[in-house]
Image (tube, rainbow, N blue to C red):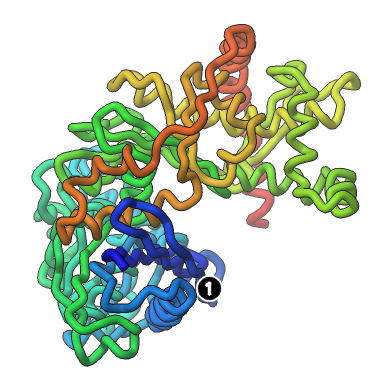
């Protein structure tokens, strides 16, 4: 058999192992889940040994099921959850469970960092807001609350970096993961001396930053049997999942853009320079190609809003779907198509989990605004998809001020529904591209990194060949007009409720 590329995507709920051939064709995939521990409110931790066990078991399962010989693996590469904090000793042994991106315990450390560096200054250096979501505040929490762990830490790493260390013995990270730590100067591409000094951090505890395409080393013979690979199999570093998804979605040249729609949702694009919003509503990663950046804006409850609607209101659709052996969302989508653009002036504010971009308001709440006796279930269902997309439209507008882009590739589970795709096209007033790969984009990006690393592929731009456009959804001019009239009202509705959000949050604390 021709040489194959093994890619692992270490996500929040599990590891997805995929096997690709030299033509970018997906041969087989396997998923292994692992647990997230939440010992206190706002905490989220994972055991890095669970990541390793998942990589080992999914690799062996994949090779066995596909009948691919381990001698035919040209490279193993990675994508992984970002913004974590895993302290390792000099032997690479974890000193505690990893504090993952979803952990919010380090609010006071983030506030301290903001006082020391200044919110605008830090945003200009790192391309990100100050937030407990990022690695630095988590590292500061370890420094203050577990000083013995901090003292014994040789390097702080991310999920994929831990697996690379296990395989090769090397402590490294890539540009994309470094750029999500609130520590990295994305303009100069180095650790920021000013931020490191302000945080009182020992820079020696940070890993070496390498290209996503670098072959870090071969799989060590001492570990090869455990993972099920041949000794000296090339290990290519790969990227954080956001940058890997960008490549898989073919966002590989300036001005190309994609919209991921899952439980959360984001809009991201490729740019030659960071896009720094004066209001700090969006943020910037470094692309898998370190000559590019990935400006991005992420909202909280996108597909999660549609899921909430299904579970709490759409009981009839769920019951009918069981009887007809259908997905409930298929029936909900039929209702969407039976309503009209604008849902007869019913607005849904999609802030069920507070909000990141564009508002960065943890106190924001969801709401239906404009309900009347004439509204039907179909209007409520459609308004949820429209409300999520209105919120994303605000993010899109921020980027449109800097880069002209007329098309967006939609990926993720939400990209499957034709009704939602049309709403995206109409509210954005842009062509929506559906490519051959919509739900495996992150894994494809990791595989491309591996292929480039060992010379199978010339560059990450091969993604456009491997993931061509299969469908194109164009805006409907009459719907565009309706949405253009509603968008200012949607924006005003959020701002009109700010005092209400604050008062409700205060009541929650009593």
Q: Which residue is mark 1?
A: 33
On the rendered structure, is 161 left or right of 498?
left
* Nearer the observer, 254 or 293: 254
Q: Is residue 124 above or below residue 218?
A: above
Which quarter of the image is occupied by the N terminus?
bottom left
Q: Position of residue 508 (x, y in %)?
A: 67, 53
On the rendered structure, is 92 left or right of 97?
left
On the rendered structure, is 469 left or right of 477?
left
| Residue 140 in view here | no
Q: Which residue is rendered at x = 56% and y = 22% of the image?
A: 491
Give SS at disc 1: strand
Q: Which residue is rendered at x = 52% and y = 45% of the image?
A: 412
Q: Position of residue 431 (x, y in %)?
A: 47, 21
Which quarter of the image is occupied by the C terminus?
bottom right
Q: Position of residue 130 (x, y in %)?
A: 32, 48
Q: Which residue is rendered at x = 72% and y = 29% of the image?
A: 382
**Dot 1, crowdedness within 10 Å: few (<14), some or many (≥20)?**
some
Q: Is residue 187 above or below residue 408?
A: below
Q: Quadrant of residue 490?
A: top right
Q: Quadrant of residue 92?
A: bottom left
Q: Position of residue 52 (x, y in %)?
A: 38, 80
């Amino acid at each position: 058999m021709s040489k194959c590329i093994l890619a692992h995507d270490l996500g929040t709920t599990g590891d997805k192992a995929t096997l690709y051939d030299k033509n970018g064709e997906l041969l087989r995939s396997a998923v292994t889940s692992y647990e997230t521990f939440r010992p206190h409110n706002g905490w989220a931790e994972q055991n890095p040994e669970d990541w390793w066990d998942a990589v080992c078991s999914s690799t062996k399962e994949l090779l066995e099921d596909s009948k691919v010989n381990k001698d035919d693996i040209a490279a193993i590469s990675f994508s992984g959850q970002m913004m974590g904090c895993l302290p390792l000793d000099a032997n690479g042994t974890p000193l505690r469970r990893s504090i993952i991106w979803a952990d919010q315990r380090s609010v006071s450390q983030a506030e301290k960092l903001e006082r020391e560096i200044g919110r605008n200054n830090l945003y200009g250096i790192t391309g990100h807001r100050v937030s407990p979501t990022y690695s630095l505040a988590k590292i500061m929490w370890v420094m203050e609350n577990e000083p013995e762990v901090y003292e014994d830490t040789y390097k702080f790493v991310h999920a994929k970096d831990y697996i690379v260390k296990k395989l090769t013995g090397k402590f490294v990270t890539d540009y994309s993961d470094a750029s999500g730590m609130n520590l990295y100067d994305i303009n100069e591409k180095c650790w920021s001396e000013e931020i490191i000094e302000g945080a009182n951090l020992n820079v020696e505890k940070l890993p070496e930053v390498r290209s996503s395409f670098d072959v870090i080393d071969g799989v060590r013979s001492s570990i090869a049997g455990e993972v099920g690979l041949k000794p000296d199999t090339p290990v290519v570093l790969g990227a954080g999942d956001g940058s890997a998804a960008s490549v898989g979605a073919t966002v590989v040249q300036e001005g190309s853009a994609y919209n991921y729609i899952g439980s959360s949702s984001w809009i991201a694009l490729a740019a030659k320079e960071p896009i720094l919003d004066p209001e700090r509503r969006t943020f910037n990663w470094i692309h898998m190609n370190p000559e590019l950046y990935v400006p991005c804006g992420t909202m909280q409850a996108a597909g999660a809003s549609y899921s909430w609607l299904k579970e709490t209101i759409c009981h009839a659709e769920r019951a009918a779907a069981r009887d007809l052996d259908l997905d409930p969302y298929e029936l909900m989508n039929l209702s969407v198509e039976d309503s009209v653009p604008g849902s007869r002036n019913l607005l849904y504010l999609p802030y069920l989990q507070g909000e990141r971009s564009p508002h960065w308001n943890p106190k924001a709440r969801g709401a239906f605004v404009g309900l009347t006796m004439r509204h039907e279930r179909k209007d409520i269902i459609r308004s949820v998809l429209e409300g999520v997309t209105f919120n994303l439209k605000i993010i899109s507008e921020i980027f449109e001020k800097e880069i002209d882009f007329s098309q967006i590739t939609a990926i993720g589970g939400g990209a499957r529904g034709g009704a939602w795709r049309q709403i995206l096209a109409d509210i954005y007033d842009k062509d929506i591209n559906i490519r051959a790969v919509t739900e495996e984009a992150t894994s494809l990006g990791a595989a491309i990194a591996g292929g480039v690393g060992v010379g199978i592929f010339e560059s990450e731009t091969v993604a456009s060949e491997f993931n061509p456009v299969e469908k194109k959804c164009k805006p409907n001019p009459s719907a565009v007009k309706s949405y253009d009239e509603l968008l200012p009202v949607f924006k005003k509705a959020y701002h009109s409720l700010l005092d209400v959000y604050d008062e409700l949050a205060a009541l929650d604390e009593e």
